[in-house]
Structures are given as C-alpha cells and as structure tokens.
Image (cartoon, rainbow, N blue to C red):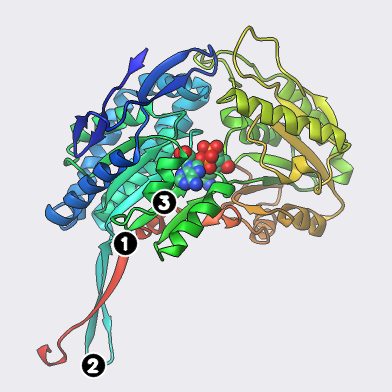
C-alpha cells in the first residue's frame, strides 16, 4: 500500500494541518491501494501562500521561457522512463486498462510536455505594432497564481494539461487533485523537481470539493482552471464571476460520431467503438452517439454490437484487457441507473446491459443501445461508462441537426469516403474539436467546448495564453 502522510507545499513535503486522510480504493480489488492526507483550508492557505511567494519574490516568472521549457523537456523524458510504473499506478487508482493507459494516461502527457517545451522556445511574449503616436509594445505577462482543479478520469493528463502551459507562461500553481486519484500527482511532483522545477511553483492539495471551492475564491489566486462535470463547472464559474476572476472550464460531453452514406464499416467501426469506450467509457471526448444513415442503420448497429460484445473485460493491469472497472461503486450504480432509464424509455439493448461475471470490482458490461432517439436520456446525458447509442438519421441535414441537438459541444467525428465532404459536415457541427475519419486530440490545437462543455480552451498556444495577461506599452513618441 502507498502511504503519503505529507503534502507538497513550497517544494517540501510538509505535515498537513489536519489529521484526516483519504483512502484510494483500487476499483478492481475494492481494496485500499493508498492513503493521502485529506487537505484542509489551512493547507490551501499555505499552498497559495507558497505559490504567491514564489511568483512575487523569485525570478521564476521573469526568467526566459526557454529555461522553463527545459524543465518540461526533462520531465517528459523522466516520465517516459517510468511509463510502466505510472500506467500501473493510474490503473490501480481508477481502473484504466493498462493497454490504453500507457498511451492515454502516460504517453499523452509526455507529448503535452514536449509540445509546451517547444512553444516555450519560440513563443513571442512581446510584439511591437504601430500605435497612434508611435510604436506600442504588446506584452504577454504571466497572470500569477493559478488554481487548478482536476477530475479522476485521466489524472496525469489533466495535471499536465494545466501545469505545462502554466509553467511556460511563468505562473505558479496550486493543484487540487481529485480525491479518487491523488497518488500519481506525488510522482509528477517528484519528477518535475528532479527536472529542475523550483520550490513553490507547484503545490499539491489532495482533497474534496470543499477545499476546491475554498481554493477557487482564495484572495491570492489570480486564475482558475477547472476540469470536471458541467454541474461543478457552473458553480465554479459563478464563484469566479463574483470576483471577476478569469476561469477556464473543461466540462462534460456527449459527442456524436456521424457515419456518412457509403462508409466502409469494416474500416471505421473498430475506430468508432474504441473512441466510444476508451478508458472504460470514462472520457469527456467519448464518441457515444453513433449516427448512422437510415439505409445502413441495421448494418451499423450489428457491427457496433459485434465489436462491443467482443471487448475483453477484466483486470486493468492485464495488458490484454480492454474494459476495466469503473472508478467507484457510485459510478457503477449511476451507469446502471442510466441503462435502466434507456430501457424504460424504449431503447433496445443489443449487447450488455448489466454486470459482467467478475468476482469483484465495479464493472458494468460494455453495452450498446439500438432504436435510440436523440431526445432520450441516454442520448442527452453524459453516461461516463462503456455505453454506446446508435441512432438513425434520414439525411445529412438531419444528422447535423441531431449532432447539434445537445447541451454539450466538446468533441465529435465525421466518417465518410469523401474526406472533403466529411470536412464540410464537420464545419457544421457546434463543437470545439472534431475529427474527420479518425479520432484524435492534437496537442498543438486548441481543445475545449461549445455550450455546456466549457469556457475557454486548453492545448495549443491558446492553452498557454489562458495563463497570460496582456499589456500594451505605448513607447515614448519622441524616442524615435
Ligand atoms: P466533478 O465535477 O465531480 O469533480 C471534478 C473535480 O472538481 C474534483 O477534483 C472535485 O473534487 C472538484 N469539485 C467538485 N465540485 C467542486 C466545487 N464546487 N468547487 C471546487 N471544486 C469542486 O467531476 P468528476 O466526476 O471528477 O469528473 C468527471 C467529469 O469531468 C465528467 O463530466 C467529464 O466529462 C469531465 N471531464 C472533462 C474533460 C474536458 O477536458 N472537457 C476532461 C476530463 C473530464
């Protein structure tokens, strides 16, 4: 069992103010895999003070970004050297199958670190443009202390997607991990320290929503960045709004995969299913609404059903496992409840629908629903489990209408033999990220949501600019 009885604050492992602890439960064994301190508001005060001190009194924010970039490059290499260990740790924390986790949970964060290291080498933090009386220097400055709050589903990915751009920008960070997944953040701190991160740049608070809420409104925080549910995002936006505090929100999704007429199902269905159930379906970008032309509907439903029924369910640490347990018993109950609701509203289960025969672990059968209408709860709510819906559409206009008929707008895909035409369809979907004939997130491109999927963008230069303020300095007109 992994026991942490201290908190990373100001570059040191310090004793927490309180005595509470959080048990990290392995969703496969249902046993305690580790414990960490349950941080309190007093710990948040100390963490924010350390971040504030480092930002205000050291050269961290004013040193060249290229120096900060070197830290990220080293950290990326160090993570790569511990890939297996980290994939195992995250699988143990939240049940992500290792076969997928190696890429999605560990390699992807190294790619984000590498991307921001590259950006730090080339980004122009000052540019001069013509003004009314002479040149104006437009300067991008680090915003200050960032409060970062993350969910449990891709913990290291979420930690890095916030910390890496904040570091390049020259900010300092107080990171509140999800209570389910605090363990990998300890390793990340260790790695970043080894890579040369100065004390106080990253401070870590394991805790629940109460300390998260306290952190959001802390007077010494300059910027809030949150990933999690839309419900929590709305509360955080309201709290930040009351302070006029900049906030980035990455929230839920209910993305559509639109299959166009004439598509080669053998080629695309495996990819669509993978993008629908990755990470046991616990992915904000999961392609959970599969839209098929009426004339191909039966074929698509059959192919999706066949592929999902063949998924290997089991121990997340076994590299051949494709579907592991859900993060918690409450998540399993929620997903089973939504499956029941799908049945009650008239959708038809073509595979799955219950709990697989496993001795223990919070499993739900990989499940496919046919005869789904877009107004049904299973087509509107984010399920966050291995549950896919296949919906028919009459013509392309109807496909676009259904894809857009959602409170969310985070991701999506369009699949067709004419890539230019598929791209045209993609242009008409109200979503922040969409892929044509593949599913991927490009770390150089902005990622985020329309509508209730969020506010602002992560990744790409836009993701770093969320940690920058803008200043215009009108130069002395007489200086020539
Ligand atoms: P959650 O909203 O319950 O919790 C997320 C984090 O916020 C946790 O650390 C939690 O302790 C904290 N929190 C909750 N309420 C808070 C409050 N009022 N003030 C401050 N902190 C608070 O979400 P979850 O169940 O941990 O994660 C799943 C959700 O995250 C899904 O909706 C998923 O789509 C979303 N998600 C979105 C993205 C994205 O990039 N858009 C990525 C991953 C996950």
Q: Is residue 41 above or below residue 457?
A: above
Which badge, 3 or 2, is on the more N-terminal residue?
2
Q: Given contact means CB atoms under 8 Å apart, are the residues at marks 3 and 2 in contact?
A: no
Disc 3 from disc 1: Cα separation: 13 Å
Whether residue 40 sits left or right of residue 450 in the image: it is left
As rendered, which of 383 and 211 lies closer to the eye?
A: 211
Disc 3 from disc 2: Cα separation: 38 Å
Residue found 59% across the figure and 51% down from its top: 410
Whether residue 179 sits left or right of residue 77 in the image: it is right
Disc 1 from disc 2: Cα separation: 26 Å
Task: Residue 122 in the image: state x and y as whole percent.
Answer: 26, 57
Q: Given contact means CB atoms under 8 Å apart, are the residues at marks 3 and 1 in contact?
A: no
Residue receiving disc 1: 468
Image quarter of the N terminus: top left
| Residue 342 seen in this snapshot | yes
Which badge, 3 or 1, is on the more N-terminal residue?
3
As rendered, which of 185 and 25 lies closer to the eye?
A: 25
Task: Residue 90 in the image: state x and y as whole percent.
Answer: 44, 24
As rendered, which of 357 and 271 lies closer to the eye?
A: 357
Residue receiving disc 2: 133
Residue at disc 3, secondary structure = strand
Q: Is residue 469 above or below residue 8?
A: below
Residue receiving disc 3: 225
Residue at disc 1, secondary structure = strand
């Amino acid at each position: 069992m992994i026991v942490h009885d201290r908190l990373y604050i100001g570059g040191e492992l310090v004793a927490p103010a309180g005595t509470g602890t959080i048990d990290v439960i392995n969703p496969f064994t249902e046993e305690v895999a580790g414990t960490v301190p349950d941080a309190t508001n007093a710990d948040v005060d100390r963490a924010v003070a350390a971040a504030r001190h480092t930002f205000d009194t050291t050269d961290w924010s004013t040193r060249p970004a290229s120096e900060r970039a070197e830290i990220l490059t080293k950290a990326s290499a160090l993570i790569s050297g511990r890939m297996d260990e980290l994939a195992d740790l995250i699988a143990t924390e939240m049940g992500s199958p290792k076969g997928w986790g190696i890429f999605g949970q560990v390699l992807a964060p190294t790619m984000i670190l590498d991307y921001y290291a590259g950006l730090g080498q080339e980004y122009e933090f000052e540019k001069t443009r013509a003004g009314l009386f002479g040149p104006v220097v437009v300067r991008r400055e680090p915003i200050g202390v960032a409060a970062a709050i993350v969910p449990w589903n891709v913990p290291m990915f979420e930690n890095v997607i916030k910390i890496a751009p904040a570091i390049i920008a020259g900010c300092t960070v107080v990171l509140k991990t999800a209570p389910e997944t605090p363990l990998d953040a300890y390793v990340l701190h260790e790695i970043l320290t080894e890579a040369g991160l100065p004390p106080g740049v990253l401070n870590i608070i394991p805790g629940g929503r109460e300390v998260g809420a306290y952190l959001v409104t802390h007077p010494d925080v300059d910027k809030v960045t949150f990933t999690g549910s839309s419900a929590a995002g709305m509360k955080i936006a309201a709290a930040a709004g009351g302070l006029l505090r900049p906030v980035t929100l990455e929230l839920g999704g209910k993305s559509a995969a639109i299959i166009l007429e004439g598509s080669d199902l053998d080629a695309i269905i495996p990819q669509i299913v993978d993008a629908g159930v990755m990470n046991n379906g616990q992915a904000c970008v999961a392609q959970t609404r599969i839209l098929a032309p009426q004339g191909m509907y039966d074929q698509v439903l059959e192919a999706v059903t066949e592929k999902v029924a063949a998924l290997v369910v089991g121990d997340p640490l076994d590299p051949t496992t494709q579907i592991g347990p859900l993060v918690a018993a409450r998540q399993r109950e929620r997903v089973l409840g939504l499956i029941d609701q799908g049945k009650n509203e008239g959708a038809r289960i073509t595979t799955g629908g219950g709990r697989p025969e496993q001795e223990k672990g919070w499993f739900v059968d990989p499940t496919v629903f046919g005869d789904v209408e877009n107004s049904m709860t299973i087509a509107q709510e984010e399920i966050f489990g291995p549950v896919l819906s296949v919906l028919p559409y009459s013509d392309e206009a109807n496909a676009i209408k259904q894809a857009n008929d959602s409170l969310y707008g985070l991701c999506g895909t369009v699949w067709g033999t004419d890539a230019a035409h598929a791209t045209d369809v993609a242009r008409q979907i109200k979503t922040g990220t969409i892929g044509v004939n593949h599913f991927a997130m490009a770390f150089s491109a902005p990622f985020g949501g329309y509508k209730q999927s969020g506010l602002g963008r992560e990744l790409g230069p836009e993701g770093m600019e969320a940690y920058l303020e803008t200043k215009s300095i009108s130069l002395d007109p007489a200086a020539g």
